[in-house]
Each structure stands twice: as structure tokens, then as C-alpha cells.
Amino acid sequence: MSKVLVAYFSASGVTAKVAEELAKVEKADCFEIKPEKPYTKEDLDYTVKTSRSNLEMADEACRPAISGCVENMADYDTGFVGFPIWWGREPSVVDTFLDAYDFSGKKIIPFCTSGISGVEKASAHIKGIVGANVCVDEGKRLGANGTEEEVRLWTELLGI
């Protein structure tokens, strides 16, 4: 039987809610990707060119430090990776998480919470980070009100 991990970053609690629904449906372990230095409201203000989030997203090599780690990553076959969409893709703090582990031979399934932006650009970016030996699914955009039923229907289609 496949062991599943749901790893997620949530700036406002929206992605956390969806990740918890997903973990419940999949009977998966859950890991919150927490920045070592939490984001403040000012850090997340995209209208200010010098805000922390703007500066991080403008620098492709930026990898903000995270707190904690998944001690037993080798035990997982499948990893759902969730995040809000920032500037069309996953936040840099998620890239820090992806860089921290060897996902060779595993399957990564991105999911995002966004009102309108899709997950396609993030999925392609994630493929570039984790490398060719990792199967990265196209992923799914789930709305802020992602219900257990919506999550269940999606994961049934995935056949995990």
C-alpha cells in the first residue's frame, strides 16, 4: 500500500483547510511548510515592490529558510504539495521544501488554492526543481472552499 504525504504552505489558512481535507480523504500524513521567519501582512503586500514576497519571487534562486523537516521522507511514495499561487507559481518557500529532499522514484501531485490562476505554471516549475527522475502530476487548482467531496472526486480520478 502506498504511503502518502500532504505537504503544504498556507499564508492565510486557505491552503491549510484544503490540505487537511485532502489528508483526511487520503488518510495521509500532513506536514506544514512553515517559513523560519513567518510572513507578516506587510511581507505579503504585493502592491509594495520592496515587500518580502515580491523580492523573494523576483529572485529565482531565493530559498527562504523553513522550520522543521519530514523525518521519514523515504517512507512516502506519493506527495501532494499544496500552496497559494504567487506571481503565477508556487511561493519560493515551497521551493525550499522541494530542494530539501530527494524525490527520485516518487510521485508529486501539486495542488493550489487560487480564485482564478491555474496550477500549470507551478507544475512545470516544480518539475524543473525535482528533476527528471520524479513523476510530477499536472496537479489541480482547488478553490478556497474546496470541500471534502470535491477533494474525494479528484483523488479518485488520480487512482492513488
Image (cartoon, grey):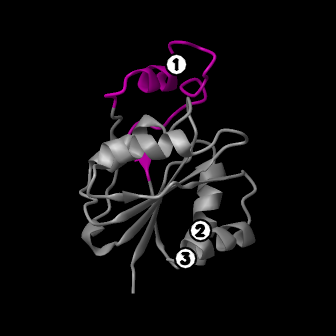
Q: Secondary structure at mark 3?
A: helix
Q: Residue at x 33, y 54 (%)?
A: 68
State whether residue 51 is above or below residue 90: above
Residue annotated with mark 2:
22
Disc 3 to disc 1, how far (Cα)?
36 Å
Q: Earlier in the sequence, mark 2 or mark 1?
A: 2
- Residue drawn at (34%, 29%), measured in percent from left and top? 62
Secondary structure under the numbered disc 2 in the rendered image: helix
Residue located 51% across and 54% down the image: 138
Which of 32 and 28 lies nearest the eye of the viewer? 28
C-alpha gap between disc 2 and disc 3? 6 Å
| Residue 105 shows in the view | yes
Is the residue marked by circle 2 packed among few (<14), some (14-19), or many (20+) residues within 10 Å?
many
Kind of residue sitting beneath label 3: Glu
For residue 51, the mark is 1
Our reading of the magenta stretch's main secondary structure is: loop
Please state if 156 lies on the left or on the right of 132 as rendered.
Answer: right
Marks 3 and 1: CB-CB under 8 Å? no
Position of residue 12 in the picture relative to residue 2 (left or right): right
Q: Nearer the viewer, residue 151 or 127?
A: 127
Asked whether residue 94 is in view, the answer is: no
User: Between marks 2 and 1, how big is the CA–CA gap?
Assistant: 31 Å
Q: Position of residue 141 (x, y in %)?
A: 64, 51
Q: Residues within 10 Å of mark 1 (few under 14, many from 20)?
A: some
Q: Which residues are magenta?
A: 33-62
Q: Which residue is mark 3?
A: 26
State the SS at label 1: loop
